[in-house]
C-alpha cells in the first residue's frame, strides 16, 4: 500500500477537490408541492469527492433539494420538479432513466436509522442482490465484509452477522445504514441529518466515517447542526425560504460569509 | 452590531468583553499620559501611581482572557462573533503592553529626577506622547463604533509618530555628544521615547484588529513606516 502521510492524502484530496469536476449539476431547480412552491430556481453544483453541506432553517428547502438529487420526491404525491439535474452527463429526470438504478448510483441515508428487520448480513446483501452485483455466496460475503469495513462497523459486528440489525445501538444502526448504502457501490451518498438521533460519540464516529468516505464518494449532507457542517464539509450551501442564499468554501462560510442572512443564521441572530 | 442573538446571555457575554476592553483602554491611556507628565515634572508620587495602576490593567487582561475562553467553549462562535472574541483577546493584550510601557516610563522618573529633563527635550517628549495618545484615544473611539474605514485611517497616521521619534532620537544623540554627563539622563529619555513610540505601534495593531473584526480581511498593504532611527549614526562613507 502506498504509505502517503495523512496530510499528504488530505492535500491530494483538496487538490482533487479544487480541480473537481461537478459530479452533479442542478440548474434552475424548482419544486412545487401542489400549489405551494418549495424551491425557487436553485443553481447548485455538487463537486466530486467533496462533502457538501446544506444548511438553513427548517422549511428552507434544503431537504427538498437533497431529495431531488435521487428523485426521492417522486414518491410524494403532488410534488413537481422543474429545471434540470444531471449526474455526470445524464439528466436524472429524463424519461428513459431507470429510477432504481439512479438510486443505486445516488444512495441515501436518513435521519433515523432504518435497518430492515433482518439480520445484519441481509441488511447489506439485499441491495447487491436485487441489483445483481454478486455472482455467488463468496462474492456476496466479500461485498458484505468490505461494506462493513468501509463503514467502520466490521470489528463490532463480525461475530454476529446473523443477528438482527435492529438489535444494534443507534449509532451502529446508522453506520449499518451507511454500509448498506455503500454496498451497491454508489457514486454519490445523500445524508439527511444522519446524526440528529445519535449521541455525541456515535455522531463523532459517523462524522469520521464521512471524512473517510470522501476519498471514494461524493457526499451531500443536510444538517441542522452548524458545527457539524463546519466539521465535516468542504463546501457549504445556505438555503433560506426556498432559495439558495450562498454557496461557498466551508472555511470562508464560517469565518466570513458573504451574505447577511448566512451570517445571521450561523451566528444565531435574528436579522 | 445591528442584530442581537436569539440567546440574550450570549449578547451579554460579548458586551461584557467590549465594556472591559473600553475600560482597559481608558486606564492605559491615563497611565501613559500620567507617566509622561510625571517625567517632565519630576513627579515621583504620580509615577508611583502609574506603577501601581498597572496591576489593575494586568488583572483586567486576565479576566478578559478567561471570559473569552469560556464564551468560546459555551457558544462555539463563528463568523463575526468569532472574530469579535479573538479580536478582544488581541486588543486586551495590546492594551496590557501599552500599560507596561507607561509603567516602564514611570519607573525612569526616579532615575532622571536628579538632573531633571531639559526643557527642549521635555517639549519633544510631550509632543511625541501627544501624538501617540491621540492615536490611542482615537483607536479606542473607533473600537466603540467598529468603523473599518476609520481604523484604516488611524493605521496610516502612525507615520507621524515614527518621524517624530526619529527626530527626538537624533536630538538626544546630539545632547550626549555635547556633554557626556548627559548620557545617563538621555539614555533613560531615549527609552522613554521608544516606549511612547511603541504605544503608537500598539494603537496601530489595535486599528488593524478592529479592521479585521469588522471586515474579516486584513488591511491591505504594508504599514507605513518612517522610523529611520535604527540606521541613525551608522557610518556611511
Image (cartoon, helix red, strand yellow):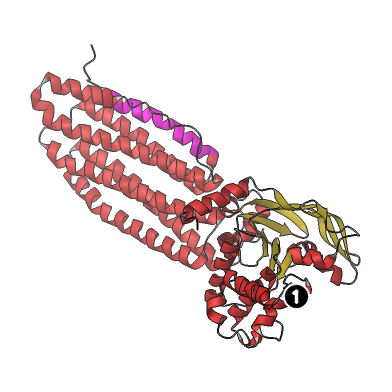
Question: How far across and how far down the image is residue B56, in percent?
Answer: 29, 56
- Which residue appears at 40% of the width and 32% of the height? B158
Please name the residue that numbered disc 1 is placed on. A129
* Crowd rating for badge 1 (residues with CA inside 10 Å; few <14, some 14–19, many 20+): some
Q: Is residue B77 above or below residue A139?
A: above
Left or right: residue A150 compared with residue A244: left
Left or right: residue A199 compared with residue B125: right
Residue A60 appears in the rendering: no
Residue B156 within the segment the image draws in magenta: yes
Question: How far across and how far down the image is residue A33, in percent?
Answer: 87, 67
Residue A264 appears in the rendering: yes
Residue B219 within the segment the image draws in magenta: no
Question: How far across and how far down the image is residue B195, in percent?
Answer: 27, 38
- Which residue appears at 55% of the width and 49% of the height? A12
From the viewer's side, name the closer residue of B170 and A117: A117
Secondary structure at badge 1 equals helix
Chain letter for the residue marked with disc 1 in the picture: A
Instruction: Give the extent of the magenta segment.
Output: B149-167
From the viewer's side, name the closer residue of A268 and B163: A268
Quadrant in the rendering for residue A223: bottom right
From the viewer's side, name the closer residue of A60 and A177: A177
Amino acid at each position: 500500500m502506498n504509505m502517503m502521510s495523512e496530510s499528504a492524502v488530505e492535500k491530494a484530496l483538496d487538490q482533487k477537490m479544487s480541480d473537481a469536476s461537478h459530479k452533479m449539476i442542478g440548474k434552475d431547480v424548482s419544486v412545487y408541492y401542489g400549489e405551494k412552491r418549495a424551491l425557487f430556481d436553485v443553481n447548485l453544483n455538487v463537486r466530486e469527492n467533496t462533502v457538501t453541506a446544506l444548511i438553513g432553517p427548517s422549511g428552507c428547502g434544503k431537504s427538498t433539494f437533497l431529495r431531488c438529487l435521487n428523485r426521492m420526491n417522486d414518491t410524494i404525491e403532488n410534488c413537481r420538479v422543474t429545471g434540470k439535474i444531471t449526474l455526470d452527463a445524464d439528466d436524472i429526470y429524463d424519461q428513459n432513466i431507470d429510477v432504481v438504478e439512479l438510486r443505486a448510483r445516488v444512495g441515501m441515508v436518513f435521519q433515523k436509522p432504518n435497518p430492515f428487520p433482518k439480520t445484519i448480513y441481509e441488511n447489506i446483501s439485499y441491495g447487491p442482490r436485487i441489483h445483481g452485483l454478486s455472482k455467488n455466496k463468496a462474492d456476496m460475503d466479500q461485498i458484505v465484509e468490505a461494506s462493513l469495513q468501509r463503514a467502520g462497523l466490521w470489528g463490532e459486528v463480525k461475530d454476529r452477522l446473523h443477528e438482527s440489525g435492529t438489535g444494534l445501538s443507534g449509532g451502529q444502526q446508522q453506520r449499518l445504514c451507511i454500509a448498506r448504502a455503500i454496498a451497491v457501490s454508489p457514486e454519490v451518498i445523500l445524508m439527511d441529518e444522519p446524526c440528529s438521533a445519535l449521541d455525541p460519540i456515535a455522531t463523532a464516529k459517523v462524522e469520521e466515517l464521512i471524512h473517510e468516505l470522501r476519498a471514494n464518494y461524493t457526499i451531500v449532507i443536510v444538517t441542522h447542526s452548524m458545527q457539524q457542517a463546519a466539521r465535516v464539509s468542504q463546501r457549504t450551501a445556505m438555503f433560506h425560504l426556498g432559495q439558495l442564499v450562498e454557496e461557498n468554501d466551508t472555511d470562508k462560510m464560517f469565518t466570513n460569509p458573504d451574505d447577511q442572512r448566512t451570517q445571521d443564521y450561523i451566528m444565531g441572530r435574528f436579522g | 452590531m445591528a442584530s442581537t442573538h436569539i440567546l440574550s446571555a450570549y449578547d451579554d457575554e460579548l458586551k461584557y468583553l467590549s465594556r472591559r476592553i473600553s475600560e482597559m483602554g481608558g486606564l492605559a491611556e491615563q497611565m501613559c499620559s500620567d507617566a509622561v507628565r510625571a517625567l517632565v515634572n519630576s513627579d515621583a508620587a504620580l509615577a508611583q501611581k502609574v506603577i501601581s495602576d498597572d496591576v489593575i490593567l494586568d488583572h483586567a487582561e486576565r479576566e478578559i482572557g478567561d471570559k473569552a475562553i469560556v464564551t468560546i467553549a459555551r457558544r462555539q462562535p463563528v463568523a463575526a462573533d468569532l472574530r469579535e472574541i479573538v479580536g478582544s483577546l488581541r486588543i486586551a493584550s495590546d492594551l496590557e503592553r501599552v500599560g507596561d510601557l507607561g509603567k516602564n516610563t514611570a519607573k525612569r522618573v526616579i532615575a532622571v529626577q536628579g538632573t531633571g529633563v531639559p526643557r527642549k527635550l521635555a517639549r519633544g517628549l510631550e509632543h511625541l506622547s501627544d501624538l501617540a495618545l491621540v492615536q490611542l484615544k482615537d483607536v479606542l473611539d473607533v473600537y466603540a463604533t467598529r468603523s473599518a474605514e476609520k481604523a484604516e485611517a488611524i493605521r496610516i497616521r502612525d507615520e507621524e509618530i515614527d518621524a517624530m521619534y526619529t527626530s527626538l532620537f537624533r536630538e538626544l544623540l546630539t545632547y550626549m555628544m555635547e556633554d557626556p554627563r548627559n548620557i545617563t539622563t538621555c539614555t533613560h529619555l531615549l527609552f522613554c521615547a521608544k516606549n511612547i513610540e511603541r504605544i503608537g505601534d500598539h494603537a496601530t495593531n489595535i486599528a488593524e484588529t478592529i479592521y479585521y473584526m469588522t471586515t474579516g480581511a486584513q488591511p491591505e498593504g504594508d504599514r507605513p513606516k518612517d522610523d529611520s532611527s535604527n540606521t541613525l549614526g551608522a557610518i556611511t562613507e
